[in-house]
Amino acid sequence: MIRLTVNHDTDPPRQFEFDQDEVLIGRQPPADIVLENESVSRRHARLARRPEGWRLSDLGAPNGLYVQRKGMPPPQRVIVEDIASGDVICIERFHLVFEDLPGFSARPKVLPTDRPEFGETFTHVTTLPGFQVPKSITAAREPPPSDPRVKLDAALALAGGVPAHHLSRELPSSPPASGRVLEVFEEGAQSPRVLPLGSAPIQFGRDPSCDVKLTGLTVPRFVASVSVVGNRVALRRVSTGLLGPKVLVDGQAIREVDLEAGHKFSVGPYTCIVRWPRP
């Protein structure tokens, strides 16, 4: 179970407790924690439970996501970050104090054992209140290693220009694959780049972390994002200034719109098409 205490200017603190695998923070429902301010994105950040603890992820919010470590100011901007009790999540003027509460959880816990050799039989003990259930298990073959980019430290990866969506490919959310992809055509190119649509947004902009790079003196760091929300694919213009490339759907400039399979849009010199298999 976790607790989040929300502090905002002179407002009384608000406390939220959750015993679930995922907590969404945003400006309006279906967010689990609603922060009512125009500077907060509708889907701003996600907390996800992992075997080793809790992970915080930026969902493409143009105003960013910051974490202040316990006793270590100032807050640092993060894309994907593991957090612990006492850390403070900073979203604009909102400060959310994170606490990982010990005690009963609805999820059974497995006591750690020494790692067995493949094929060796070992015993683990699953604990529930008042019960200990030993169980013999034969170690399975080693699963193939995941993409090493997922394990990169976020700050180091972004400094090296690794796209942000590679850092959070393991985040639990709505089905990340389902065959949904974004085809990105550059002017003059015969074939597109194909980017998988998953739990983390695909970003367009000048920043080194963006998946689709845009160049030019007037191009903002972040221009647009494409993300999967439930069964929808959302296209959003995240830059707020008048300068920079427009985001066009059917020739019309948009701020935010849901896309269907086969929908085409353009960002600067790129033309993009959303694809996914028919049911």
Image: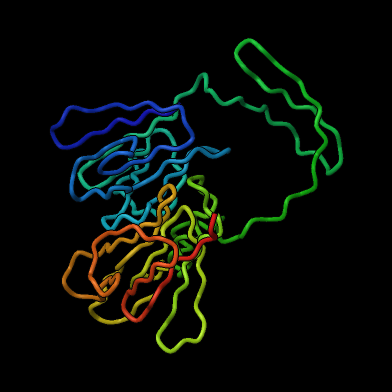
Rendered view: 256 above or below 32: below
Q: Is residue 194 left or right of residue 29?
A: right
Image height of 211 relative to 257, above or below? below
Please determine whether, in this image, residue 18 is positioned above or below residue 277: above
Closer to the camera in the image, 270 or 140: 270
Q: Residue furthest top?
A: 130
Res. 268 image quadrant: bottom left
As rendered, which of 172 and 79 lies closer to the eye? 172
Closer to the camera, 270 or 36? Answer: 270
Residue 259 in the image: state x and y as whole percent. Answer: 37, 60
Q: Quadrant of residue 88?
A: top left
**Residue at figure coordinates x 38%, y 71% from the top left:** 264
Left or right, 159 with respect to 64, comes to: right
Left or right: 11 with respect to 163?
left
Looking at this view, is 182 or 203 the one in front? 182
The location of residue 93, given as percent across then percent down, is: 20, 44
**At 54% across and 50% down in the image, what residue appears?**
170
Q: Residue furthest front?
A: 279
Q: Colour scheme in the image?
A: rainbow
- Residue 205 in the image: above or below residue 140: below
Question: Image point 17% across, 27% down: which residue?
Answer: 12
| Residue at far bottom of view | 188
Quadrant assignment, res 71: top left
Look at the image and tell me in which quarter the C terminus lies. bottom right
The percent coordinates of residue 52 (x first, y second) are 56, 39
x 50%, y 67%: residue: 195
**Residue 251, position as x, y percentages in the image:** 26, 75
- Count of residue discs: 0
